[in-house]
Image (cartoon, rainbow, N blue to C red):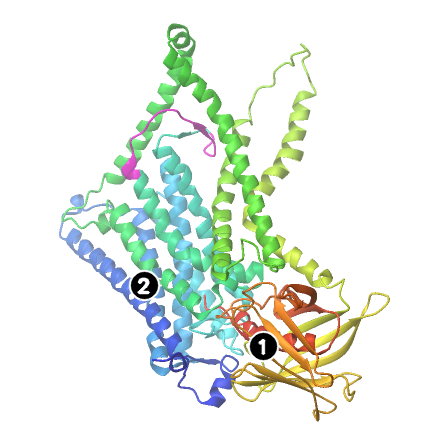
Amino acid sequence: MSADLFDQTVCTPEQQAGSGASGFFCYTRRQNIGLLAVSLVGFTSLVAVVAMLGLIIRNKLRTRKLPKSERPRLNSMEIFVVSLLFGDLFQSLGAVMDVRWINDGIVRVGRLCTAQGVLQNIGQAAIAMTTFIITLHTFDLLWRHGGVQSLKWAYTLVGIVWTFLILTVVISTSVHREPSFYAPTPYWCWINDSYPKYRIAIENFWLWIGFAVAILYIPLLFWFTGHITPGEPEWWTFKLNRGQANRSKRSTRLIICALAYCLPVLPTSLARWFLVVHGDVKPFATAEAQFIVKAIFSLSGVCDVIAIRFARSDLPLFSTKNQADTSSEKADITTSAAASERSRSSESLANADGSETEADNKDEPAESNTSRRRWRLPLGICGWLAINALYAVWVTYYIGSATNPNPRTAVNRSHAGWQVYFLFLYLFGFLWGCVNIVVWIWYFQSTARKPVVKSRLGISSTLLPYARGFARYFILLPISVVMGLGPFFAPVAGVRIAQQQAWLHRCDSFMVEVVLDGLSFNAPAGQKAVASFSFRQPDGSLELRYQYNLTNDNASISHLTLWSGPDVASASQVQDITYDFDNFTLLATCAGNLTQCSSGSFQESGYLSFSLTNSSDSSTVNLRAVDKVWDYGKSDDAPSFLLKEVQSDDTLGDLIVRTAVTNAGHCQLLKMCANNAEIETLAPVGLALLKQSEYAKVCTTPNSN
């Protein structure tokens, strides 16, 4: 099947023109295939969840046959996990409902759309909120032997979650009818992008907070591997432990529990984070990327069932055995407590007898081990600081390449490499931000009660506590906040600030600033893409002089036409440029489109280039881009190039025109810098406006995730 057939739809031309702007969206065959994959993944999760719920019903029926004294006692964790499974059930049903849109070739507002939106909204939010509760319960249960011990409290928490979700969804759907609260977004139905605050309050906030509290599995993992010991009586403290522990099975269970939520939700969290904080969703903008993100999120049911099977199999309600072991959880807690006490006791004895040990054991291996331990902490701190410094360099290169992509560097030489670069940047930033937070918490709690000693000069310094307090709260605390939150927000904030500065000042050294306004996703019918030329005045201000719009006769012929300006009838000003994309030629006319001004050819693939001939004197000017990659096949980024004049020796000379940067928060706007509005500037501007309009449609398309 050819590429053209893959891009065909079942919609009429009139429907296709209004697709996305009138409460419906037309699929191409290519998008149908992607949506089918999402539905199959959702169906897989649905089967897994239904099978697990069937196992629960089977076990419950079996236990009813036992005498009351032998029936396993229900515990809080089982209640929470059942709530999680029902969240997975709702989400999976919502994903399977995509089959209806695949069959019709159109997704539209209506009862079915509302039903899918409700199922996906409640399911995804229930997964996030229940996972949040499970994580806190697991941490409190193991770390300080607390948790939700009362079944009444467990039922109350689950009841609050589902009551909140049901009431919020019912009220929101009833109140917000115009526009519909649930609508195509555009590939499936979710909360309408007209209600961004509801997206955050009902779902995104809980998605992010559920992801954030997963870091509580880290101290549990370190405890079970013998690296730290919980502090007493303050539960939020801990101390380093040099002992060894053999708890690999429990550590593996914790890792499975953490990954079961984090892996499916990570791409969706990043996509929504980009949309809310960054203002766009560049790496997730294309249909293919959105389908991949949704498919991964739809695996949540499968991942949760796997986690229950391997990490929660000791819970009686989920046991595959005929008789459930009701004492396993208590035994685990008792074992943890006993091991913790043994670790603390052995450490106390070691500290009490430490002087004797050092006096009696002075052989070379012991001294070597002591020396290694002495240097372990300083080396660890140096390594930690070095990684932070390298990450700062990483972010700096990202900000520079994102806001000034030309000329290309090793970072953005290829578009695929650039996407991998900044996706890993954001992923590593999240993980490293968590590490920094843990390190600083450890530092502050380990130095909180450090005794004040006399100075070496023998002076009992009363100022020393004040100096320590000043350094702690006015120097170290701000540094810790920056290092803890910086990896989360530095790339986003840095790009936004640099982008705003580039928009204001990138073209300061040029005589002309050109703003390209591409057509957005839901642009009204008849609206045209526009290029506005502003000329710099002697006082530095800008004066709007010309406006050209872009029209298309068909897929092969486009026109850049002057429609506003003081010199519309001027014989020297270009009135219209016709681009022929079959033959890669162009023709410019002047004086009311009656006189041919210039003609030439252009090359899109490889290095962008133009060969332009003036009809009056037959002079020719050749232009070529500095970098090879200037446009992207999936239109998932704005066009970018530096176009220079080609000298007689085939080297590049003066800069003629360049792209600057897109507007922060308005991705359909792209600024270009030039020195005139003649044919050598207008020809590249028209082609850039065409590509910018294609990108604008992608970047303003509501993200279905």
Residue 507 seen: yes
Magenta residues, start to end: 234-250
Residue drawn at the location 76% of the way across and 87% of the way down: 568
The answer for how far apart the CA atoms under marks 1 and 2 are is 55 Å
Q: Pointer 2: residues within 10 angstroms few (<14), some, or many (20+)?
A: many
Residue under the image location 32 percent in, 32 percent down: 336
Quadrant where the N terminus is found in the figure: bottom left
Q: Which label number is shown at residue 89?
A: 2
**Residue under pointer 1:** 602
Work out whether residue 206 or residue 675 is closer to the camera in this orientation and state it. 675
Relative to 444, residue 622 above or below: below
Is tag 1's residue or tag 2's residue first in the polypeptide sequence? Answer: 2
Q: Position of residue 163 (x, y in %)?
A: 42, 61
- Identify the residue at image location x=57%, y=68%: 638
**Picture residue at 22% right of the left edge, 56% below the top:** 56
Q: Amino acid at mark 2?
A: Leu
